[in-house]
């Protein structure tokens, strides 16, 4: 039986809102990652870096597994540098997030609000990376996140693993 099925209506409503907030972390990650891939665009870089600070804890551990190269980082700034380096040769990128599943592992309530909590989330990824020669690198994978709640910061990811499922290279048509 899931954690939420034993809760009263008010707590179930709070968990519903929390689920949306947790899922939104991954959506923001996609936007921030694409922004960091815009080489030379200072505003985009600042948006990406500040968004990483919003969605990640200061001590976040991050891993990419199963792909052509293993990537790791610790902390939002470290991971931003890894992302910028990984995307610097692309003309553009688009990270599409879907099929998100959130499971709350521990949530405490106090005075009608969430006071502390932990959850795990998995999210599918389709990432398109366009090179200047009009070829594309398409990555499919699954993000596995561990998140926690603090009253000061809300929900944040403290552990992230991107597990590559497949990588494909193909030629793109002309933009119209």
Image (cartoon, rainbow, N blue to C red):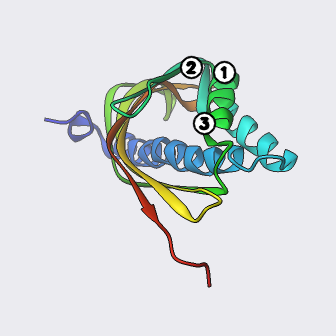
Helix, strand or loop under label 1: helix
* First-in-chain label (1 vs 3): 1
* First-in-chain label (3 vs 2): 2
Residue 50 visible somewhere in the drawing: yes
Distance between mark 1 and mark 3 Cα atoms: 13 Å
Residue 108 visible somewhere in the drawing: no
The residue nearer to you, when weighing 53 against 162, is 162
Mark 3 neighbour density, 10 Å: few (under 14) some (14–19) many (20 or more): few
Residue underneath mark 2: 73
Q: Position of residue 157 (x, y in %)?
A: 51, 29
Residue under the image location 47 percent in, 41 percent down: 22
Residue under the image location 77 percent in, 46 percent down: 39
Q: Position of residue 158 (x, y in %)?
A: 50, 22
Task: Check the image and name the residue furthest to the left.
Answer: 1
Residue underneath mark 3: 86
Circles 3 and 2: CB distance less than 8 Å?
A: no
Rendered view: 176 above or below 71: below
Circles 2 and 1: CB distance less than 8 Å?
A: yes
Helix, strand or loop under label 3: helix
**Nearer the camera: disc 1 or disc 3:** 3
Mark 1 neighbour density, 10 Å: few (under 14) some (14–19) many (20 or more): some
On the picture, is 166 further left or further right than 169? left
* First-in-chain label (2 vs 1): 2
Rendered view: 23 above or below 79: below
């Amino acid at each position: 039986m899931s954690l939420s099925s034993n809760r009263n209506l008010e707590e179930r409503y709070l968990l519903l809102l929390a689920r949306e907030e947790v899922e939104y972390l991954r959506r923001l990650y996609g936007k921030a990652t694409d922004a960091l891939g815009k080489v030379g665009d200072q505003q985009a870089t600042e948006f990406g870096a500040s968004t990483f600070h919003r969605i990640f804890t200061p001590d976040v551990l991050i891993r990419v597994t199963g792909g052509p190269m293993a990537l790791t980082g610790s902390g939002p700034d470290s991971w931003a540098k890894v992302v910028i380096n990984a995307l610097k040769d692309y003309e553009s990128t688009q990270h599409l997030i879907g099929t998100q599943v959130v499971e709350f592992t521990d949530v405490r309530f106090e005075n009608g609000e969430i006071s502390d909590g932990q959850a795990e989330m998995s999210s599918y990824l389709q990432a398109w990376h366009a090179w200047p020669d009009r070829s594309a690198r398409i990555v499919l994978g699954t993000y596995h996140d561990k998140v926690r709640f603090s009253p000061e910061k809300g929900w944040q990811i403290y552990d992230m693993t991107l597990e590559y499922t497949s990588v494909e290279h193909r030629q793109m048509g002309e933009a119209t």
